Amino acid sequence: MSTLLLTRRRGLAAAGWLGPVVRRLGSGLAVLWAAATAAYVALLFAPGDTVDVLIGDGLDTPERRAQIIAEWGLDRSALEQYGDYLARLLRGDLGHSYLLQRGVGDVLSSQIWPTVSLALAAAAFGVALALVLALATAGRRSRFGDLVGLSELVVVSVPPFLIGILLLAVFSFTLGWFPVSGDRGLVSLVLPAVALGLQISGVLGQVLREGLERALEEPFAVTARSRGITEWRLVVRHALRHALLPAVTLVGWFTGVLLGGAIIIEAVFGRPGLGQVTVSAVTGKDMPVVMAVVLLSALAYVTVSTIVDLAYLAIDPRLRRSR
């Protein structure tokens, strides 16, 4: 194949990616702008004076009030205040916590890793378990498959915090295999990740299995069987690719489940993280921290959904040509 032809094909492939990537990035920026604006409007329309809302339960002195008015430009017009607010966000300035006496960026950065590690561990556990069980039971009628299906329905129906309490009772209080609370490295991450990831494995496993069984009835599967391919190779090499499309979309949706569930699971297991920060900010009326958590949640959701959309295009090249 000539170098010119190869270069042309690579150019067409890059062009196929360009449009979807630009559109996805544009919609992601629009979501972030909407989240930032909604948080700012909520601040302005909160009951009481804006300075009182920003101080919350923090120390209230004339000097502190003057500092807040200067930082937020509250002595200027509403449009100028809004423009300054967006400009500060673009510079990465999330404001100041008048309750904790620290920058909001410092507060979040000191607590973000425990939450991210918990979410990643829960997602990895849930996806791996769902993949293994779906591959082991798809297209087979057996007692093991029935038991797996029933177990998936149970873990989907039970709230993660209740699973966490049961895990604590058995593996921490009774057997003593894992610490009861706190962050003591990987060993203290196991039970929270399992409690949060089981629900993911339940839903994802059902979607994967249904997709695999539907793919195994497609004409390409019949053709592959006629050529003598083994059933296991057919599932792994061919059917799994088709079953991944709806499953990948679900992984993006689970971002919200992980973010919301992590707050409760961190409280159950007494772990540090954004969950504890959010609860403390809400109970202490620390509005700058609450607004920053809203923006961070929107950023996390936009980032993951963008990656999922691009993965969707990578799995099925036909989508790049249709968009």
Image (spheres, rainbow, N blue to C red):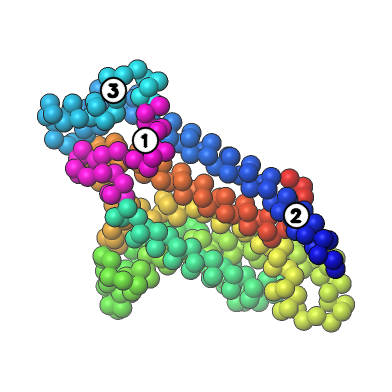
Q: Are marks 2 and 3 in contact (CB under 8 Å)?
A: no
The reply to whether discs 3 and 1 touch (Cβ–Cβ < 8 Å) is no
- For the residues labelled 1 and 2, the Cα–Cα distance comes to 39 Å
Classify 66 as above or below 154. Answer: above
Rendering coords of residue 8 (x, y %): 80, 56
Dot label at residue 11: 2
- Vertical relation: 101 (above or below) 240: above
Residue 154 in sight in this render: no
Q: Residues within 10 Å of mark 2 (few under 14, many from 20)?
A: few
**231 or 139, which lies in front?**
231
Q: Amino acid at mark 1?
A: Arg
Residue wearing tag 3: 74
Q: Nearer the viewer, residue 311 or 8?
A: 8
Q: Position of residue 68 (x, y in %)?
A: 23, 29
Name the residue that disc number 1 marks.
88
Which callout, 3 or 1, points to the residue nearer the camera?
A: 1
Mark 3 vs 1, N-terminal side: 3
Q: Amino acid at mark 2?
A: Gly
Judge whether residue 309 is colored magenta. Answer: no
**Measured Cα–Cα span from mark 2 to mark 3:** 52 Å
Please report whichever mark, 1 or 2, sits nearer to the chain's N-terminal start. Answer: 2
Secondary structure under tag 2 reads: helix
Residues rendered magenta in the picture: 83-108
Q: Crowding near pointer 3: few (<14 within 10 Å), some, many (20+)?
A: some
- Element at badge 3? loop
Amino acid on which the number 3 mark rests in the picture: Leu
Where 144 sits versus 59, above or below? below
Q: Quadrant of residue 216?
A: bottom right
Instruction: Verify whether residue 97 appears in magenta.
Output: yes
